[in-house]
Image: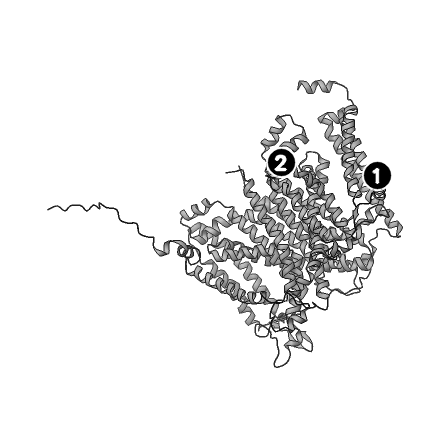
Amino acid sequence: MTQEPYVRTEMLTEQPAPLGQTGIMRWMRENLFSGPMNTIITLVAVAVIARLLMDFIPWFFQPSWESTSLRQCIDDPAITGACWGVIRERFNQLMFGFYPSQEQWRPTLAFVLMFVAIAPVLFDKLPRKLMIFSALFPFLSIWLLWGGSIWGPTMTLAGFGIGYAALKLLSGPAGELVAMIVAVLATILWWLFGVSPVAEALHSVVSLGIPEVESSLFGGLMISVFIGVSGIAFSLPIGIVLALGRQSDMFIIKTLSVAYIEFIRGVPLITLLFVASVLLNYFLPPGTNFDIILRVVIMVTLFAAAYMAEVIRGGLAALPTGQYEAADALGLDYWKAMRLIIMPQALKISIPGIVGTFIGLFKDTTLVSIIGLLDPVGLITSIRGDADWNGIVWELYAFIAFMFWIFTFSMSRYSMYLENKLKTTH
Amino acid sequence: MAMADQSAGKSFRLSMLLYDTRYRSLTIQIVMLALFALGVWWLLDNMYANLAKIDKDPDFAFLSAPAGYDINQRLIEYTSQSTNARAWVVGLLNTLLVAFLGCILATVLGVTIGVLRLSKNWLVARLMTVYIESFRNVPVLLWIIFAMTIFTETLPQPKEFRGADASASMFLSDSVALTNRGFYIPRPEWGDGSLPVAIVFILSLVGIYIFGKWAHKRQEATGDILPTFWIKTALFFIPAIVAFYIMGQPITLNYPALKGFNFQGGWYMRNSLISLWLALSLYTAAFVAEAVRAGIMAIDKGQSEAAAALGLRPKRVMSLVVLPQALRVIIPPMISQYLNLTKNSSLAIAVGYMDVTGTLGGITLNQTGRALECILLLMITYLAISLSISLVMNVYNNSVKLKER
């Protein structure tokens, strides 16, 4: 007799997957316990983390916020770990240095407005009109920080108006080239000789202004942000010019650019800051003596420009030759080709590098403490030298490190976001 | 061609300097050069005017004058009577010392962390990410000062090691003492007869190299694989140890011991050196780790899959296929990190380590008042170091460049 082959006629009900193959169990088996070696490593890592947290958490959460000296923290039986009073007491100093407390709204306002100013650069969804504010912001922020009469920055701004007017008026009758030269000359002459008498005259008529604050009172995170942001903002155009110079066919221009870039990249920033603090006045006309913060910003800008040039050169090199050739084929001259075709693409590619340069520069601003400016690192000595806080170590350093970390970490995340967004490849 | 002929036929006009592309680049370059020369002349003129006002001329004679200050950390003979030039060299050697030590430690740490960050173990990979993000996002100057403060504030004073019920104790069976003045570690003493031992050791190193070559050739010829690792290890240790005992144990260790208020004997490593070294290496290691990770990730997955398909074990896939290709990507950023480390070592001035910035750019500058000359020499020194490192990098880059047909 032949046996009927067995054929199932009804569907089996779906079984749940084995426990080890789903959800968290599977994830843990694959990522933490995939072999004997891995299991040991995981256990050791867990032990190390647990150990660190067991030490750290009790140390961190302490009712010491209101204490006024380290002695008080040690004497208080309720406090067995961190003495956070130092942060509460010195918070304003760490932010603003010795900036007068009734004027501290000014740096704060400038800081907030800075985000408004860079927003249109960072996010392209915002209206382009905001760029006008970005252009005005440098003058506004300098006026807010240093104070004084409002006429100085306004008249400086007026220089651009004068230049533009000269360009418009003369380009008809005298030709573009002459108009250009006259406009530049007029602007520079106005800045050199026109601004201060006119501003003074206006000030004596309508005295509008806020109290002046000396540079020696500047300090804290404010100084780091100011030097970092102005360094990067001014170094970007110089960097672009240097990068183009390095790519140029013209021998002399190329040599000068390469020499400058390699020289700056070959020396540590601290030597340039020494130049700012003791040497820069030697190279200026006798009798000139200007602000130390301004001198530092100049040197930091020159420093960052070389790094910026290398970043942008990377962007230029990454563009396919076809782009240059296409620009030539359209009959564009050098500057038009650069402005309309090459630079928009090259800058886009180099944005992550630019942000990276900025992060590096922002961290490097701590070096100004070595030439005696009171940035957060420079303030450490004075705070630890105070009788109340003598001997404090971890809390202060941890807080300052955290301040810098917040800035740099969020910037590096932004650059990663940008990298993803700008990716035009598949 | 026709156009070129036409314009060549015309006589030269002045406006062609500006509007003719053949001459324009020449015009621009000459104008630029003139502007540059004018700028330099302006700066130098100002400088001489300023110097004349304070009755000084650029003068390097101070280099041969006695320095008049002590340097506590030195690799060569130096006293306060030595010249400023010698102080400069002492500082330069200290810079190179900390840079060399830092590069080694940063490489070891960085490669380990970079590889571990790619680990399949989720927890380890996350831990390494935390390390990298926390170290590279905080200024290195802060790390240096922080390390220095921790060493001076939390380590015991030498006097705490004293007495029967001392509150601090030495490590590794009383051979290493960590104090708030620095670390004391044993120092080898070279007695009579240590020269032969050293010679034997060097010979065995040569032997290891020759053996490696020979084993490689033999493997290519016959296909036999020798246990090279074990033979090399044996070659490394056994001859030297045998020679050591035959010569009657000529090399001894000089242990640090507490005498009076401080430790005597052994090697004394200053806090400033240790904190600078550690902080620079931990900071740079985060960047090296990123370079290593990027290098390994740059290798196409197909490469390791193909190697696995050939039947290579995972270890060999790494060492024979992935790493040789990844190294080409890893080495250039790594060398530029070494360069950064060397430049960052100039922050030694913040913890009082006497590197070239501390001697030439610090005390010599302040004592002689020769700011211009000192900073110029300082910049040239760093420039020379940087340029030689980038020279090495270029040579390497050319040697590993993909040979394309």
Q: Are marks 2 and 1 in contact (CB under 8 Å)?
A: no
Q: Residue sitting at 79 percent across and 34 percent down?
A: A162
Q: Quadrant of residue B189?
A: bottom right
Secondary structure of the residue carrying tag 1 is helix
Q: Nearer the viewer, mark 2 or mark 1?
A: 1
Q: Nearer the viewer, residue A355 or B249?
A: A355
From this view, report whether residue B117 is shown above or below residue B195. Answer: above
Residue A308 in the image: state x and y as whole percent. Answer: 66, 43
Secondary structure of the residue carrying tag 2 is helix
Q: Residue sitting at 74 percent across and 59 percent down?
A: B358
Q: Closer to the N terminus: mark 2 or mark 1?
A: 1
Quarter in which the N terminus of chain B is drawn: top right
Residue A364 in the image: state x and y as whole percent. Answer: 68, 52
Pinpoint the chain carrying mark 2.
A
Looking at the rendered structure, which numbered label has been put on residue B40? none
- Categorize mark 2 by other alpha carbons within 10 Å: few (<14), some (14-19), many (20+): few
Distance CA(mark 2)–CA(mark 1): 36 Å
On the image, numbered disc 1 is attached to which residue? A194
Q: Nearer the viewer, residue B224 or A210?
A: A210
Q: Residue sitting at 66 percent across and 62 percent down?
A: A87
Residue A334 in the image: state x and y as whole percent. Answer: 67, 30
- Which three-letter amino acid code belongs to the residue tagged 1? Gly
From this view, report whether residue B178 is shown above or below residue B89. Answer: below
Q: Quadrant of residue A423?
A: top right
Q: Nearer the viewer, residue B167 or B178?
A: B167
Looking at the rendered structure, which numbered label has been put on residue A344? 2
Residue B99 in the image: state x and y as whole percent. Answer: 65, 57
- Which three-letter amino acid code belongs to the residue tagged 2? Pro
Q: Nearer the viewer, residue A117 or A290?
A: A117
